[in-house]
Amino acid sequence: MFKKENKTKSTKNDNANSEVLVINKNKNIDKVINIALCIILFLLPLITIPRGMSSRTYNVPKYIILLLCGAILLVCILIKLKRKELKLDLIDKTLAVFFILIVISTIFSINIPKSILGENNRFEGLLTFLVYFLTYYCAKYYFNYNKYLKGFAIATVSIASIIGILQYYNIFPLYSLFDIPHFSSIANSTFGHRNFFGSFLAIAVPLFMALYITKKKKIYLIVSFISFWAMLVSMTKSSWFGLAVATIFGLIYVIKRFNKEILIRTLQIGIGFIVIFVFVLMPPSFVTNKVNNDEKFYSLETRLNSIGNDIGTLLGDGTAEEKMATGTARFGIWMATLESIAHEPFLGTGPDALKDGLIKNVPEYVVYRFETYHETVDKAHNEYLHIAATIGIPAAIIYLAFVAQIVFGQKDVFKNNATFIFMAAILSYLAQAFFNISTIGVAPIFWALLGLIQNEKFKENLQ
């Protein structure tokens, strides 16, 4: 009898030990996932080769790190798949359909190697899309909040913003210290191009604005000011548009959640932004002398005037060539992209193979572009058009359905502070994407936000 009881106890202990072992293994896998996500979110944006040193490889370090982290995430997901621990809701299934369409488009691409690896220095082929989706999925189900994340986010945004500001005013010391060639008064920070820097700030500025309004920590206000200043000197109109959309969304939140403290914090942000705007628009002489006023320099006044001029040209009696040149030639790129879509509507040209598609489908525009601007086009300067042109119209519809499910599925957006914080950044990015391009230094952050806004455990602990 005693032997039977001992066997029973032994079996129970073995089961308990087995359960503890499984739990510990799961925790270890989750830790690895969280480390990889932190590298993608907080280190990846800061890694680059200075644009002046190599205009063709500045994104290579980002691409290598992104693929390495993606490989780590993939292994972790495969382990969880083997243990039958993966979850798939309707939104995830929509994303799976999008990925299947990307694979099919790659198979029938007009340039298969490029569609797998991506355009030179763009690197947004099939492999990169896979990493984006893994980032989204892991952020949604496995990213855990901890006390260090706030510091990482503050450091990343502050460092990137300060570098951009110093570049604009030609006082970035690393350039002179290491004799690095650079474009004077062009703020591209660690992103290789001011438009990419602007898309990063389109996420960062609304995020920290929302954090300060809801959490009232002064450090969030300071980072809001620094990143807004960087956004202005980046001279990226698409990021300004994104911020405008996020601001309207934020004002709705303020009205719905109206109280004295929220109003005061909103006014503090508004007043600070106005002061910074005036300083950049009408800088004192000692600052003006630091800025390069050659033909490459964009002043804030010039950029603001160009908005009205572009609208007037498009809606007025501008010539065909004038309309093609509006929005730094974006309108012409959109027209050529639409023509390429008309030629290959279902599967597109293949991921990241837009340049090949334009050469094949719109050769006259390629010649015009080269003769006029001495360059070719490899991005549509509108993320939605780009997806339709490279992966196909069905893929673009599925992508929009995927995003819509997330955005419109957040019923507590004005009641849950964390949902509001993430939504402000997501809406800003989606708005600027109408005029900008996806880049590997910023897009993973956007995909992570799409996952985090659905991660209830993370949102509950967000401080």
Image (cartoon, grey):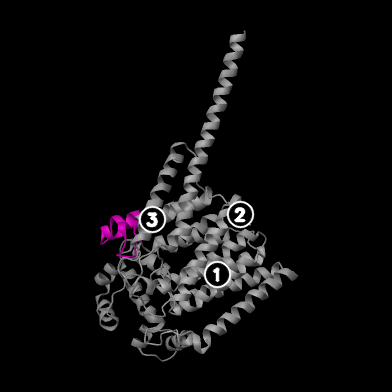
Which residue, given by chain and number where applicable, does mark 2 sit on?
A: 459
Q: Amino acid at mark 2?
A: Lys
Side of 114 relative to 101 (left or right): left
Give how far across and how far down residue 457 sits, in percent.
60, 49
Q: Amino acid at mark 3?
A: Ile
Q: Give the residue furthest to the front.
A: 177
Side of 173 relative to 255 (left or right): left
Where is the N terminus found, in terms of image quarters?
top right
Instruction: Find residue 65 and name its label.
Output: 3
Give how far across and how far down residue 110 sits, in percent.
26, 62
Mark 2, secondary structure of its residue: helix
Residue 110 part of the magenta segment: yes
Q: What residue appears at the point 36 percent right and 78 percent down from the top-left corner?
A: 183
Q: Amino acid at mark 1?
A: Val
| Marks 2 and 1 close (CB-CB < 8 Å) | no
> Crowding near pointer 1: few (<14 within 10 Å), some, many (20+)?
many
Between 277 and 169, the one nearer to me in the picture: 169
Q: Nearer the viewer, mark 1 or mark 3?
A: 3
Which residue, given by chain and number where applicable, does mark 1 sit on?
A: 205
Q: What residue appears at the point 40 percent right and 71 percent down from the top-left corner?
A: 174
Between 90 and 130, the one nearer to me in the picture: 130
Q: Which residues are magenta?
A: 103-126
Q: What residue appears at the point 40 percent right and 65 percent down from the top-left corner?
A: 439
Give how far across and how far down residue 361 sits, in percent.
27, 71
